[in-house]
Every structure is written in structure tokens, then in C-alpha cells.
Amino acid sequence: MAMYTTERSDIVEPERLLVVCAHPDDVDFGASGTVASLTDAGAEVSYCLVTSGEAGSDHLALSGDELSALREEEQAAAAKEVGVSDLHFLRHRDGALQPTLELRRDISRVIRRVRPNVLLTQSPERMLERVFASHPDHLAAGEAALCAVYPDARNPRAFPELLAEALEPHTVAQVWLMAHREADLRVDITDQIDRKIAALRAHASQTDQHPDLDGMIRGWAAMNAEAGGLAEGRLAEAFKVVPTA
Ligand SMILES: [Zn+2]
């Protein structure tokens, strides 16, 4: 079982986890240590990527289509490092995400297919202290995912086209938010940090120019652990827990 540090008594153990993120690499920066720990424990984990990241490079040698194809491959390789092989690409437009009804429907479709008991996504609330974690696409993906969890995916009258696809309503019991200032759950990833960094290195189009990826990721994880009161030397990822059942 994953190692949790929390004052909450209502943590739902993810048996089937769906991760919804705006861009390829977001899950690996925020949560892939936790994902590795869960898949080690036998949980089934699926990823839903809302965009394929075609706006995510300052180098204009590749076309948008080439970049999105590359980034989908990178995400699949990164997922493999942490035991995930079920990926759903929604291919909404990178850099232009809005929590539209169309996006809520597309995420609801994946929820009804995967039928997770816990969904992990990005915070819809902007952190003014860490604006890079609060990219507008992240806020939109988090908002649309929360709307899909409640009320859309569970409501048989929401998006009747999904019922026509034989996708029955589904209630997700709990949502975990990345990059939220009021984190109340820390997951110890000390034993998974090498795989998290390997997953991030798989996103070479994003990380291969970084002067000290290893040091940055370990530094963030140490700060998360310290804020959660974990023992000295431990590393953690941090989440805000939202009960949704
Ligand atoms: Zn992102």
C-alpha cells in the first residue's frame, strides 16, 4: 500500500485511478511517484491527456502535428516507467483550453469507460505563489474534470449521447488535486523517486535542456515532505482531497 501522511480519516484507497491532466508531462511533475507506488500495490491506473502539448516548445522546427505525436509517444514511455499503459488522448487544443461542455462530456466519457474510484487532476484554483503550476490550461482541465465527476458522469440525463454509447453513469468517490495551496495528503515517494525522474526524462522535448532536473525534483519532493511533517530525508507528493460521493 502507498504510504500516506494526513490528518484526514476519509482517504479512499485508489483501486482504479484515473489521472486527468492538461498536458503530457503534468502527471509526471505532480504525481507519478504516487502512481508508481499505487501500481506496485496492484492498483489499475489510467491517464487522460486533454491536450497533446503541441504548443509546448519554443523551437519551431517541428510542426504542431509532429510535436503532438512526439509528445504522445513521450507520455506513453513515461507512463510505462510507472506501470501505466492505458492512455486516453482527447486532443483538445493546447494553450486554448476552456472548461466547456464539450470537454466535460469528453472527460465524462473516459470516466464512464474507466470507472475509477479515485480521480486525480489539477487544481482549478490559481496559486498566486506558484503561477507556473497554475497554467491556464491546468485550471481549465481541473475545472472540467471536477464538473465531470460532479455532476456529469453520474447523471444519466447529462450527455445522453454517452448512454447511447452504452456508457452507464458512474460515481467517483474522491478527487485528489495537484498543485493546491491547502494540500492535506502527502504520499511518500522516497522509494519511487528514481522512477519519477526516469518518467520525466522520457519527456525529452521538455526536460532534456534542464540543467538540474534531478536536483529540482528532489528539492520539491523534500519540501512537500517537510510541509507534511514526514521524517527528515523523506520525499513526497502533495494533494488536496475532495470527497465526491
Ligand atoms: Zn502543463
Image (cartoon, rainbow, N blue to C red):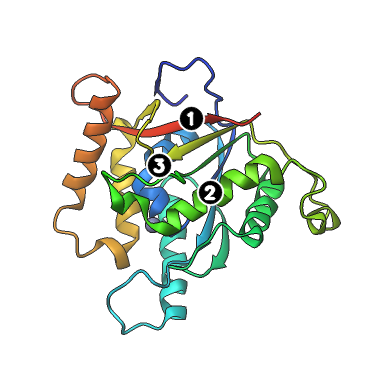
In the structure shown, which secondary structural element does the residue marked by tag 3 occupy? loop
* Residue position for label 2: 143
Dividing the picture into quadrants, the one containing residue 12 is top right
Give the residue at mark 1: 241
Kind of element beneath mark 1: strand
Q: Quadrant of residue 105?
A: bottom right
Mark with earlier residue (3, 1):
3
Image position of 239 (left or right of 220): right
| Position of residue 6 measured from the top left corner of the image (x, y, whole percent) | 40, 19
Q: Residue at x 57, y 48 (%)?
A: 145
Q: Which mark is residue 31?
A: 3
- Which SS class for mark 2? helix
Q: Is residue 123 above or below residue 53?
A: above
Amino acid carrying label 2: it is: Glu
Q: Nearer the viewer, residue 79 or 118?
A: 118
What's under tag 1, amino acid-wise?
Val
Q: CA distance from mark 2 to mark 1?
A: 15 Å
Disc 2 versus disc 3: distance between alpha carbons? 18 Å
Residue at the image position 37 percent from the left and 42 percent from the top: 179
| Residue 241 location (% of width, % of height) | 48, 30
User: Comparing marks 3 and 1, which lies closer to the viewer?
Assistant: 1
> Which is closer to the viewer, label 2 or label 3?
2
Q: How many marks?
A: 3
**Some atom of ligand 1 lies within 8 Å of the CB belonging to the residue at label 2:** no
Asked whether residue 151 is in view, the answer is yes
